[in-house]
Amino acid sequence: MEGCVLANEVLDSFPVHVLEVARRGDCQEVYVDLEGRSVVEVLGPISEDALAVPSSRGAAYLEAGNRFEVCLQLDEWFAQASRALRRGCLFAVDDGDLEPYAWLRQPCGSVESPGPEGLSPSPLENPGRKDITARVNFSAVLRAANARGRPTPFPPAWG
């Protein structure tokens, strides 16, 4: 097609891998498990080789115990959008920041779980009754867009 693709509040709905910086400077992945009838977090090894570079990038700026998210879906999404859009523009509007500010401003990670009033903000409590979202890493978005032939002539705007 020729035209404009407007992705408003799309990128923050993609799944993310939550990583935590370990004492030795590498990262572990945060997994979800069951402990009795409760949903709990557990740390384990990184699940995919594709997380190696992004994990070292984030760990270089953060201290042990700090968390950040990595979205591996961006490359494929931009690849699909690029194939569909023969000529035109692709606008992505979302909440987020550039590296390293995305991590430094929220060293506990940016995963949020807004939901109906009266529910805990924890994404592990009342699963299925709330949205789970994370802020978008615009540096990763720019890398994915540029890799798929969608150069970004203007820097992202944020407030």
Image (spheres, rainbow, N blue to C red):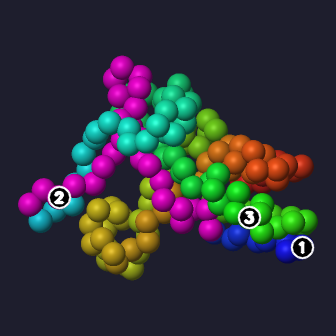
Q: Judge whether residue 106 can be spotted in this image.
A: no
Residue 16 sits inside the magenta stretch: yes
Question: Which dot, 2 or 1, sits closer to the camera?
Answer: 1
Q: Which residue is mark 2?
A: 34
Mark 3: which amino acid?
Ala
- Rendered residue at 27%/72% (across/down): 126
Magenta-drawn segment: 10-36
74 left or right, relative to 4? left
Viewer-side residue, 125 vs 51? 51
- Residue at the location (39% across, 74% down)? 130
Q: Which residue appears farthest toward the left when viewing the image?
A: 36
* Rendered image quadrant of residue 159: bottom right
Image quarter (top left, top right, bottom left or bottom right) of the N terminus: bottom right
Position of 146 relative to 33 (above/below): above
Q: Which residue is mark 3?
A: 81
Under mark 2, the amino acid is Leu
Kindly identify which residue carries mark 1: 2
